[in-house]
Image: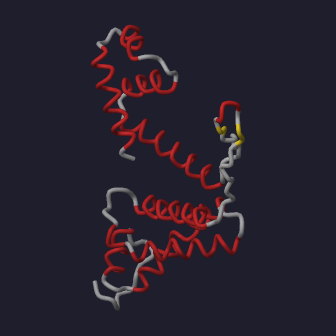
Amino acid sequence: MTETEPVESQSSDDVLIERIQAGDQAAFNLLYERYFGRVFGYVARRINNRADAEEAVQEVFLAVFSSLHSYRHEAPFAAWTLGIARRTVANRFRKKNHPTVPLEGTEEPHGIRAIPMVHREATPLENLECSERAKDLSTVAHIELTDEQRRLFELHHLRHQPIQEIARTLRKSEDSVKSNLYRARKLLLAR
């Protein structure tokens, strides 16, 4: 294909990426148009200010363009692009100044200083990151873990049952339970 050939709107993402990397501006415009709606929708749901959302979307597409060389085709391009959008939104939340609370303690009897307990609600960034992480872990758990690993993980980490009790209930050795839990955690933490 040469740069003078028209870019078809039905071209696959991979074809468009190859053309972009070869310097084809029209291919990038088509890719931008193809994903703008999804990216803008994703960002706008997380950033309530339209101007900030538009600016963040531009940051996303700048990052997409500048890091196309690192796209490895292991996941769909849409997922890769939305991953960049998620990180861009998270970085924008991190840049905001959050109020700090001084760690002034009060003097207790016997000269011990007590640090006051500060109760606060999670920041929007913390809520976003927690929600995204929970979705990612749930997806990985259903795709990559065996039924047995999911069950063991649930019993031990969510229901807080001791390994000895799980082994006895499932009629397995403790080493088998520990091994399966180790593999499950390793898969989940890799994400």
Foreground pick, 104 / 14: 104
Query: 169 above or below 103?
Result: above
Q: Which residue lies most toward the bottom here?
A: 4
Question: What is the image's colouring?
Answer: secondary structure
Q: Say left or right for 119 vs 155.
A: right
Count every numbered label the image shows and give the total.
0
For the point 34% across and 69% down, the residue is: 14
Query: 185 above or below 55?
Result: above
Q: Say left or right for 135 vs 175.
A: right
- Give x and y (percent) for residue 26: 43, 85
For the point 32% across and 79% down, the residue is: 21
- Give x and y (percent) for residue 20: 36, 80
Q: Say left or right for 49 vs 54.
A: right
- Give x and y (percent) for residue 186: 33, 38
For residue 63, which quarter of the picture?
bottom left
Q: Quadrant of the N terminus?
A: bottom left
For residue 11, which quarter of the picture?
bottom left
- Give x and y (percent) for residue 101: 69, 53
For the point 32% across and 23% down, the residue is: 178
For the point 42% across and 27% down, the residue is: 153
Query: 170 above or below 118?
Result: above
Query: 89 above or below 144?
Result: below
Q: Which residue lies most toward the front here?
A: 110
